[in-house]
Image: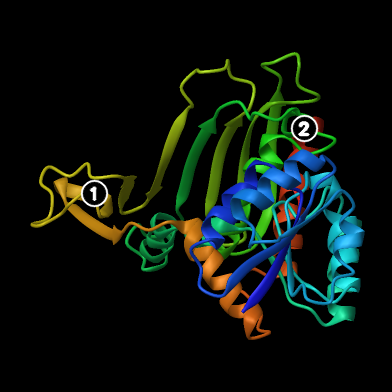
Amino acid sequence: MLNIGFIACGGIARHHASRLANVRGARIIACADTFAESAESFAAEFGEPGASTYTDYRRMLRRADLDAIWVCTPTFLHAPAVIAAAKAGKHIFCEKPMAMKPGDAQRMAAEVDKAGVRFTMGFVRRFCPEWGKMKQIVQSGTLGSPVIWRFAAGGKPPNQWFRDENKGGGPLLDGAIHNYDFALQMLGPVASVQASSCQFDSTCVGADTASAILNFASGDQHTLIWSWGMAKGAPAASLNDLIGPKGTLQFGMTADKAPKGFSAKTHGAFTFKGAGGKQRVFTYKRSDMFLDQAKHVVAHFEKNEQPLATAADGIAALEVGLSVLKSGKSQRTIRL
């Protein structure tokens, strides 16, 4: 049994709580939000009967019956919440990115180590069956070496703080942090980054649209474009594929013929296209990555074991992200 408390009860907190509701042994017994009505509605929807609500999370952390805390505040508020939870002796799930400043992330990691509690990052793409299959294919050598992973995404976040680079870092930090973390696992350490940023929406604070190239020590590359300045309701840009000396790996079933028995309802696919018209389809079983993440974290916290994503992983991805932001502002290559 794991007794859980939430710090902040907004959209991403509700996303996590809805998955925890389907995890055996997970019990949400308390939540805190600066808006009392937000905490109350959250507790009513996701909490155990009699779940307590707070407007000051420090009061909630005094509870001896709380085992773990889900920190779902805006990024610029992660550090004080994580440090307070660690000092209170609670295991911690922290939403990404880890912090806005490397010094804050280092202090968070130090306090976690000092307290002897478990800490994990919300790098949910670690549990994405699609990206997991991509990693497997790339590391098998199917594409050859080096490889280039191309990615583009866009939209308009509902909350203003997402579009304030001082509070969330903008799309190439808050959004693309998943890419940085996963690319580090798939391709190894980053050697340098190059980026360029601009602004589509004048209501944003700082750049809301940017492109970047991550150059890896292995010779591989990851190129990405993110925009959070698109008009509301405009279709989000979408690009996701990989190229290498041996061919192209496309997301989706783009082969001339699907494998026998393939069902898009239960399985996804990658299509490799190589020399001479060669085609090969790789399939994977679809699953809810947020639910899989919740099951993993709860199981490890219950056993006082370290979940997959560590504080060191959070710091490493943050270093890449902040280097990308620095490059975008200076229009210079930043070496890590």
Secondary structure beneath label 2: helix
Return the disc, 1 or 2, that comes first in the chain's sequence: 2
Residue 336 can be seen in this image: no
The quadrant where residue 190 appears: bottom right
The quadrant where residue 122 appears: bottom right
Left or right, 61 with respect to 74, comes to right
* Residue named by callout 1: 265
| Residue 21 versus residue 269 in the image, above or below | below
Is residue 120 or residue 303 the one in the foreground?
303
| Residue 203 versus residue 42 in the image, above or below | above
Q: Residues within 10 Å of mark 1 (few under 14, many from 20)?
A: few
Q: Residue at x 86, y 58 (%)?
A: 81
* Residue named by callout 2: 161
**Residue 169 in the image, given as x and y percentages of width and height:** 77, 38
Left or right, 149 with respect to 171, comes to left
Q: Which mark identifies residue 287? A: none
Where's the C terminus, which quadrant? bottom right
Q: Residue at x 83, y 69 (%)?
A: 109
Q: Residue at x 80, y 25 (%)?
A: 206
Q: Look at the image and name its color scheme.
A: rainbow
Is residue 176 or residue 64 the one in the foreground?
64
Secondary structure beneath label 1: loop
Residue 269 can be seen in this image: yes
